Image (cartoon, rainbow, N blue to C red):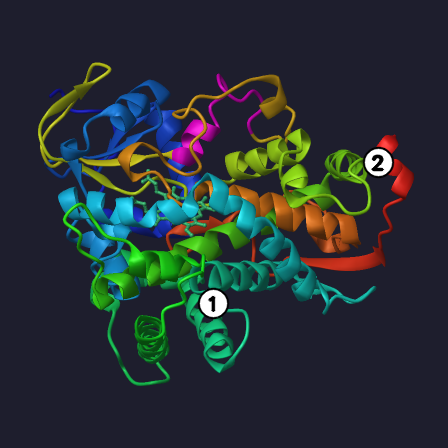
Amino acid sequence: MAALPGSKAPFWRRAPKLILRPLDYFEDNYRRYGSVFQVGASSPPSIYVADPVVIQGIFQADAAQFHVPAQNVGSGLTFLLGNQSLLLLDGERHRRHRRLLMPPFHGDRMRAYGDVICTLTQQAMADWHPGQAFNLRAAMQDITLRVILKAVFGLADGDRYDRLRQLLSQLLEGLGTPLSAFFIFFPGLQRDLGPMSPWGRFVRIKAEIDALIYAEIDDRRRHPHPDSTDILSLMISARDDQGQPLSDGELHDELMTLLVAGHETTASALTWALYWVHWLPEVGDRAHQELDRLGPDPDPLAMASQPYLTALCQETLRIYPVAPTTGIRIVSEPMTVAGYEFPTGAVLFLNIYLVHHREDLYPEPDNFRPERFLERQYSAAEFLPFGGGHRSCIGMAFALMEMKLVLATVLRQWDLALPERDRRLLKPVRRGLTLAAPGHLQLVPTARRVVPPQAAFA
Ligand code: HEM
């Protein structure tokens, strides 16, 4: 293959910018080298792809065409999720786990989660008071953690639940700083230098979480809840094609994956959505008008199917996608896609951020404009906040439903305002492998809202 354009600088020279200013890093490369470019001089090459035609070909290719990395970022995540996590599995084991994990995330199940999401959001908002600013990220993380614990374990109270909630918050807060990303990109830094060292603290919190998860699995095996619809109950009773269940170790790693992948990401997306709604008055007004028309006590599914609310969530995930790239795909056999030849071992990063900022797809891409999603349809390779193909996010429907219902519940109950200092265009910062709003962002409740009953007929 003729070498692709791109910077030949070694990883250690590129890493600081990639880690600390990822969007500048992506945009600079895109401007200089185009929509398919190589980074570094390694052979086989590492390649970023921001061309929807190429991405489409990759999403449609056979699953056997790619594998996930055994080293680098893959092993960096192993410390958190274990090595039997869907995110890190390949081939037949990946297929088997995906089939066992998918059912709780499909169609009818979403209905059951609707009421739960609204109720848990109401509970979390009980601590909000007029005039008292609160940290937006922490508030959203609190809600999404409550939701995922309830959905995954069926837990909403009790000592184990309280402790898990506390420990998971601490763990992810510790890993959420831009600097902690170095632990993921450079696994050699993962050294336990005692309980006060960053990694030592992490190891101890993680050990306690592991013990609580294994205790919950053990309890459920001894005392099954036959009528429960939580994800753990469904996973314990699930059987693969050979009639085999998931082992305790497999269950643990998948539970940890769902807990981490399932609430951090959604908390980031919700933080951004509430920022946009309160930074741009026309967006807030339109969202309120749509929700007010539903009257005082709407069905969660009616709220979730509102077109502007849906477009608002899509635009939130477009402009600053939580995951700037999809998971890494390594080419298993040489392949040609849209004229590009990718050799065996080529490391592909599908760049969600760059695709979402292409002028030809999204005119004025730096402007937040939900209407663009009402005006045209985007293909799976043009709008891809949840990745795609055989490794697409299994929580996509759940996350979208959760985003819409939390937003609707908050907006219907409170008038909120951004403090003066945050009424400006904010840029994302790194949070582990993901991007998020700056951690200091706050909102101030100004008044409780009352939805006039006649609004339903307006
Ligand atoms: C706004 C919220 C979310 C975003 C932006 C997001 C984004 C992503 C992305 C980009 C991927 C990689 C896809 C690829 O490589 O093609 C992914 C994978 C995954 N996500 Fe999500 N996700 C979100 C919420 C969730 C939720 C709620 C869950 C579960 C409760 C979840 C579980 C997973 C899992 C298990 C995978 C790995 C799938 C596989 O490798 O087969 N995610 N997600």
Main SS of the magenta part reads loop
Report if residue 181 is visible in the image: no
Is residue 382 left or right of 36 when viewed as pictured?
A: right
Residue at position x 59%, y 49% in the image:
114
Where does the C terminus fall, quadrant-wise? top right
Q: Position of residue 447 (x, y in %)?
A: 85, 57
Residue at position x 30%, y 43% in the image:
327
Segment colored magenta: 352-365
Label 2 sits on residue? 456
- Please, what secondary structure does the residue beneath circle 1 have? helix
Residue 359 in magenta stretch:
yes
Residue at position x 33%, y 78% in the image:
215
Q: Position of residue 95 (x, y in %)?
A: 21, 43
- Which three-letter amino acid code belongs to the residue tagged 1? Glu
Q: Which callout, 2 or 1, points at the residue further toward the start of the chain?
A: 1
Rendered position, 160 above or below 90: below
The residue lying toward the viewer, choosing from 373 and 104, is 104
Tell me the distance, in whole angstroms, between the alpha carbons under discs 2 and 1. 41 Å
Which mark, by number, is residue 96? none
